[in-house]
Image: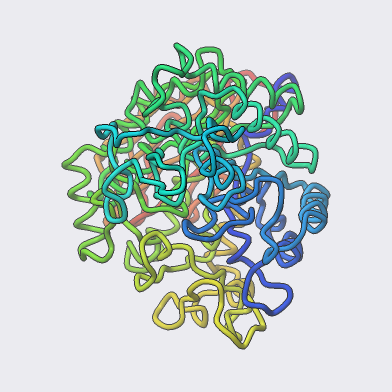
Amino acid sequence: MFDPAVSDQWWRNAVVYCVDVERFMDSDGDGVGDFRGLTRRLPYLSGLGVTCLWLLPFYPSPGRDDGYDVADYYSVDPRLGSLGEFVEFVRTARDLGIRVVTDLVVNHTSSDHPWFRDARRSRDSRYRDWYVWSDEEPAEQGKVIFPDQEDSNWAWDGEAGQYYLHRFYSAEPDLNIANPDVRDEINRIMGFWLELGVSGFRIDAAPYLIGGTGIENAMPQDPHVILQGMRGFLSRRRGDAVLLGEVNLDPGERETFFGADGDELTCLFDFIMSGAVFAALARGEAGPLAEQLRRTPTPPRTSQWLNFLRNHDELNLSRVPEDQKVDVMASFAPEEEMRIYGRGIRRRLPPMVGGDRRQVELSISLLLTLPGTPVLLYGEEIGMGDDLSAPGRLSVRTIMQWNDGPNGGFSTSADDLTAPLVDGGPFGYREVNVAEQRRHEDSLLNRVERAIRVRKESPEFGWGSPAVLETGDHRVLAHRCQWLEGAALAVHNLSGDEVEVRLDPQELQQFDQFADVFGNDRFDPLDPAEPVFRLSPYGYRWLRGRVAGSEVAL
């Protein structure tokens, strides 16, 4: 069940894995992960079934915002390796069938960037207009993103003798995206990394890139032409390259970032669907997810939604209905130290569900079967925990846990590591690590690997048109994704109770064959004329079918 005409749209059926080079694998014993270490672990990622690596920022940086304060867009942080080692990494990944996407952080630079250092010295600097300045502190426009750290979007610079705009941290002055020279430079940055073999970029905080705070009069009448220009440049340089967009906006507004003709961002992270997953888990019922599945619009033909459970930031609930947000917070972040910015949860999934393996598996099953492309956070495949003693978002950005040896197998360093390593408790590296789970057939790692393999063999989940099916029980979500002559069907019990599932035979009558492909249990074959079966607490079942009369094999 495959359409050769669209086979080049690899992102529609990809398995994306988000990795922090600094925290993944240290090759030289200095306590910092690096590209040599990541390259050595590529066979592990290939075996897991990953087809695309999304790299968090690895550029030179003073480190005031965990690498998002970039000081040089054309190099690699020397702690992490060299450009040559980056190219070796990309080549090796390509040989293993893995594409590489990098973070493109061009809302702002570091205040240590040479552009800003030059700009602040003189109003005649060629870089002065690359940033946004004001003689007087303007009235606030828009919300302060990090209210625990900043109280204004403008900061005074004594050397420049003016205020400058910073919608993130004051150490990150905003670039003036209205300036054509800045936009040309962004294209050069993309072109540079494309020449080194990357397959695209993840646009950090995309709405803020084209949001006109402080520069409204200078912006194009339709700011989306900026994204269209970036996409056009990308497509000219490499036709199969993608732009992934971090767009956490309300329904109706977020979809505009695809572009009316699919000519802006290729893929959008679905923050609303992520929140619906946790609302459904908190309530033990399918309603929030079923409602969101029905509401989510179909993206343009060349575009895609990106689904995720947790990412490297907080679980952002700002777009979740207030009553659902209250339930999610109460269930998964009952203590104040687990919350952040008044809108999110700074925990990984396994601790949120009390280490309940059934709920972890159910969540990953949902991730892999919801319409769109799945994105895993490093360590999610083994059920890594978090470190709430770390400040802010760093609680979930802990060291990858490879084995139960010193430093969890991450590094041979005898000194401090670059980031926290979870040491102790049920999620400590002695209890949760890759080596231990490799030895056990029923481990979470092996279950996830098998699930990913089946997901890649079921392109209907990535390509198909979704439909929510009636189940006869509000605790059960069933949805079907139909594409060409086939369909994939996923059924999930969101509750801790055993349930009986009753599907509507009319929903299945157009199919003459259904086969089980994955699940938490062994099931009797599904009878489309009488589709009734039971699911255990937090149970799940995947099936694939073909349209009646089709000669295509499953």
- Horizontal arrangement in the rendering, residue 324 relative to residue 232 (left or right): left
Is residue 416 visible in the rendered structure shown here?
yes
What residue lies at 76% left-to-right and 28% top-to-bottom? Answer: 238
- Foreground of the two, 372 or 108: 108
Q: Residue at x 63, y 23 (%)?
A: 231
* x and y, in percent, of residue 375 in the image: 53, 46
Residue sitting nearer the eye, 18 or 330: 18
Is 432 displayed left or right of 495 in the figure?
Answer: right
Task: Determine whether 264 is above or below 261 in the image.
Answer: below
- Quadrant in the rendering for residue 406: bottom right
- In the rendered image, the quadrant that contains the C terminus is top right
How many numbered marks appear? 0
Q: Is residue 135 left or right of residue 367?
A: left
Q: Position of residue 289 (x, y in %)?
A: 33, 38
Q: 55 or 500: nearer the eye?
A: 55
The N terminus sits in image quarter? top right
In the image, residue 29 sits, relative to residue 483, either above or below, namely: below
Colour pattern of the rendering? rainbow
**Residue 187 horizontal/vertical position (percent):** 67, 30
Residue 494 visible in this rendered orientation of the protein: no
Q: Residue at x 42, y 59 (%)?
A: 360
Q: 47 or 265: nearer the eye?
A: 265
Q: Position of residue 35 (x, y in %)?
A: 72, 61
